[in-house]
Image: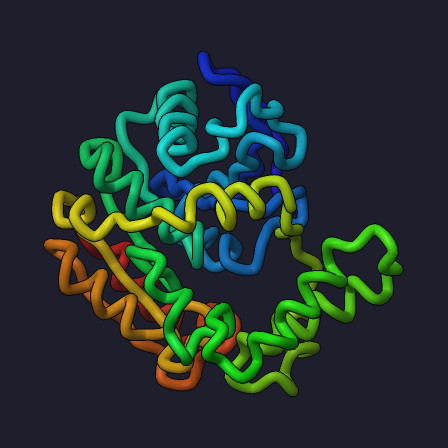
Amino acid sequence: MWKQIYVKTARGQFEVFVSGSGEPLCVIHLYSEFNERGNYFANMFTDSFRVYLINLKETGNSNRAKTKEELSMNETVKDLEAIREALCLKEWNYAGHSTGGMLGLVYGSKHPKSLKRLLAGGGAASNDYMKHKESIYSSLNPRNKRLKELFFILKSKESTKEERIQAGREWTEMSLFDPERFDEYFSKPSSGRVVQKRLDYFSYEELPEYDIRKDITKIKTPTFIFCGKHDSQCPLIYSQEIHQLVPLSKLYIFENSNHFPFLEEKLVFEDMINDYVKVV
């Protein structure tokens, strides 16, 4: 179980869950909510780091946002800086997956002196991935029609709890290299519930203009980029692009993974973390 703490900052109070020992590591997702059960991704780092798993504004018991703009990546990065300072940390490390990784790239480009190491996976530096035929979010993808039906079920107030659970499972199965192993991968208790308000802001307010390709060329932090070879959300080509743009970056490709290599190839992922820890 993770220890719950509250961090008071000039930008509000944040609920944070802490576990592990070692150098400090910030782990977040742009629109997920965590609790004392931790998170599958964050759990991978607790043997090597003291992990701070953060609930952003509008998630968990953290403060609500006073304006919708506070949900943006740029404002969220300011929140992270306020949390780091409140924790009296001169610098910390960062690890993020999917939109958590995208946020990490924004953080690294704006506050390079705050991050000792940066790890970002399964993401993209622009909204181009939404148009790629290999992404389930693209209208060119044959599974996109069904994905939209699942999203309708998840958002509808008329859907039953069982229907939403099944829809969530099917969405996740679309992002697994071997969907039949779903129960194996997700058998242990975890947290990471999607917070619709933050997801909607990202989808409708931020994503249409999302393009940080010029910004990430300024990142000075040693950076690890990772991606499953068969990623159906943000195809591999977009992690390769990030690697080409970010100085001092290293790319890890997981040959037998889709969007969740930390579950699909856990041992290989642990090898990557071991390399990550060794970076000075």
**In which quarter of the view is residue 15 placed?**
top right
Measuring from the top left, give residue 107's x and y in whole percent. 30, 39
Measuring from the top left, give residue 254's x and y in whole percent. 36, 78
Asked if residue 206 is positioned above or below residue 233 in the image, the reply reads: above
Res 207 seen here: yes
Asked if residue 197 is positioned above or below residue 143 in the image, the reply reads: above
Measuring from the top left, give residue 152's x and y in whole percent. 72, 61
Asked if residue 131 is positioned above or below residue 93 in the image, the reply reads: below
Q: Nearer the viewer, residue 255 or 49?
A: 255
Residue at x-position 11% and y-position 54%: 247
**In which quarter of the view is residue 179 placed?**
bottom right
**In which quarter of the view is residue 237 placed?**
bottom left
Res 266 seen here: no
Instruction: Give the image's coloring scheme.
Output: rainbow
Direction from residue 191 to residue 97 in the image, left or right: left
Measuring from the top left, give residue 197's x and y in whole percent. 62, 40
Residue at x-position 34% and y-position 49%: 210
